[in-house]
Amino acid sequence: MHKVKTPIEVRYQETDQMGVVYHANYLVWFEIGRTKFIEFLGFQYKEMEEHNVVSPVTNANIQFKKPIRYGDNVTVATWLEAYNGIRTVYGYHILNGEGEVAVSGTTEHVIVNKDTFRPLSLKKTFPEWHKAYKKQLEGDS
């Protein structure tokens, strides 16, 4: 399993009245990390969209361990947590400047037809993505 690390610059507008990053922004950072992970595998969400397919989040979990503040240097580490041909679960660690896990979480996704929102099999619809995901779970990068 390969972890893709993506640097994030904490912007002032991402913080709340307490001076820490507002909790919903971590989901945006997860998305940035997920996009970079998919690009690392050689794919782009744009490819799906060109086939009238989108990948909505069906579940998200976040655990907050340490605050992140404006001006901090952080990194999003992203990996493939689970995949069964239909559902994909990505794992995330938001690492602070000292390399400590400040936030961790997962997001679960399926792919659907954009017009009907009917679920599709990633294995059947995008076999190359399926192969790459299976390879990640087997530990090959």
Image: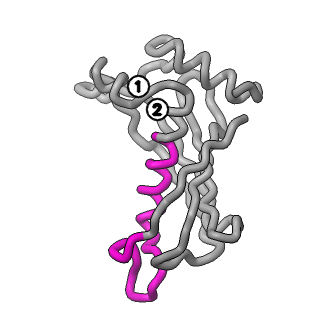
> Would you call the spot at circle 2 few (<14 residues within 10 Å), some (14-19), or many (20 or more)?
many
Label 1 element class: strand
Q: Is residue 47 left or right of residue 108?
A: left
- Residue 72 or residue 122, whichever sits in front: 72
| Residue lying at 40% horizontally and 77% vertically, measured from the top left | 15
Q: Position of residue 90 (x, y in %)?
A: 58, 42
Q: For the N terminus, which image quadrant?
A: top right
Name the residue beneath numbered marker 1. Answer: 119
Q: For the residues labelled 1 and 2, say whether their Cβ atoms are less than 8 Å apart.
A: yes
Disc on the earlier residue, 1 or 2: 2
Please say if 109 is above or below 8: above
| Location of mark 2 (residue) | 110
Numbered tag placed on residue 89 in the rendering? none
Q: Residue at x 45, y 85 (%)?
A: 19
Amino acid at dot 1:
Pro
- In what element is the residue under mark 2? loop
Q: Within the image, what quadrant is residue 49 found in? A: top left
Residues 81 and 33: in front is 33
- Queried whether the magenta region covers residue 15, the answer comes back as yes
Position above or below: 72 against 128: below
Residue 137: image x %, image y %?
71, 29
Q: Residue at x 39, y 71 (%)?
A: 11
Q: How is the image coloured?
A: one colour
